[in-house]
């Protein structure tokens, strides 16, 4: 939005209260991004607040060449990746199969047609498998497959080359496939 550029200029000129309007405009997008990396709503709220604080502190670096939405999205993704790295250090066993819930467990252990799994159960299984991926691999899969971003957009978000993103995407898909197979071969 060109409105965002004007709003940023007013904030830089001393209208600090206008920052609340930027937050209001982009909070849904930021929450949506963060929720793909963290399912605990309290943590998502904390990460969103952290994202907007980082954006406030770096507002002077916003040059307006790309839409503000892309700029704040990059900050949200980096905040989520930092969070995942910290969490990985603190968690040895991220999520147990038993934590998936009865429906997903029944589906995993049944001989019935696996296509009968409801969307919620499939989402739980996908989340479990995604959590087994390293943070950058998870970021590439989420941005490409769930958000529909191009390799170029992902490269900009992760501040790396398009080639590096393509390679990471291929490897991440292979890791995700193995993680999904491992979930399916869980305890009987």
Image (spheres, rainbow, N blue to C red):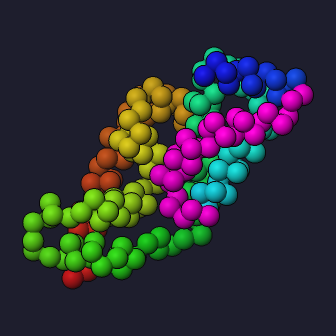
Res. 186 in view: no
In the figure, 10 relative to 94: above or below?
above
The spot of residue 107 in percent (x, y) is 20, 72
Q: Residue at x 10, y 74 (%)?
A: 111
In the foreground, 136 or 18:
18
Q: How many marks?
A: 0
112 left or right of 117 in image:
left
The spot of residue 187 in percent (x, y) is 26, 80
Q: Residue at x 27, y 74 (%)?
A: 103
- Residue reaching furthest to the right: 14
Quadrant of the rendered image containing residue 76? top right
Q: Which residues are magenta?
A: 14-42
The spot of residue 127 in percent (x, y) is 39, 60
Residue 22 painted magenta: yes
Q: Residue at x 48, y 28 (%)?
A: 153
Res. 131 in view: yes
In the figure, 188 relative to 80: above or below?
below
In the foreground, 138 or 48:
48
Q: Quadrant of the image for the N terminus?
A: top right
Q: Residue at x 52, y 46 (%)?
A: 33
In the figure, 111 relative to 114: above or below?
below
In the figure, 21 relative to 175: above or below?
above
Residue 40 painted magenta: yes
61 left or right of 134 in image:
right
The spot of residue 70 in percent (x, y) is 57, 30
- Residue reaching furthest to the bottom: 188
Quadrant of the rendered image containing residue 105? bottom left
User: Magenta-highlighted stretch: main secondary structure?
Assistant: helix
25 left or right of 142 in image:
right
Q: Quadrant of the image for the C terminus?
A: bottom left
């Amino acid at each position: 939005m060109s409105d965002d550029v004007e709003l940023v200029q007013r904030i830089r000129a001393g209208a600090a209260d206008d920052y609340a309007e930027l937050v209001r405009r982009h909070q849904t997008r930021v929450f949506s991004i963060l929720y793909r990396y963290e399912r605990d709503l309290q943590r998502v709220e904390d990460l969103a607040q952290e994202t907007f604080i980082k954006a406030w502190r770096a507002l002077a670096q916003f040059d307006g060449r790309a839409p503000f939405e892309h700029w704040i999205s990059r900050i949200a993704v980096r905040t989520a990746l930092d969070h995942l790295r910290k969490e990985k250090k603190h968690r040895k066993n991220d999520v147990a199969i038993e934590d998936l819930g009865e429906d997903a467990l029944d589906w995993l252990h049944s001989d019935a047609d696996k296509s009968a799994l409801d969307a919620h159960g499939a989402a739980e299984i996908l989340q479990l498998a995604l959590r087994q991926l390293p943070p950058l691999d998870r970021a590439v899969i989420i941005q490409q497959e769930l958000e529909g971003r191009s390799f170029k957009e992902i490269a900009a978000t992760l501040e790396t080359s398009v080639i590096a993103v393509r390679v990471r995407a291929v490897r991440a898909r292979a890791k995700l496939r193995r993680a999904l197979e491992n979930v399916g071969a869980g305890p009987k």
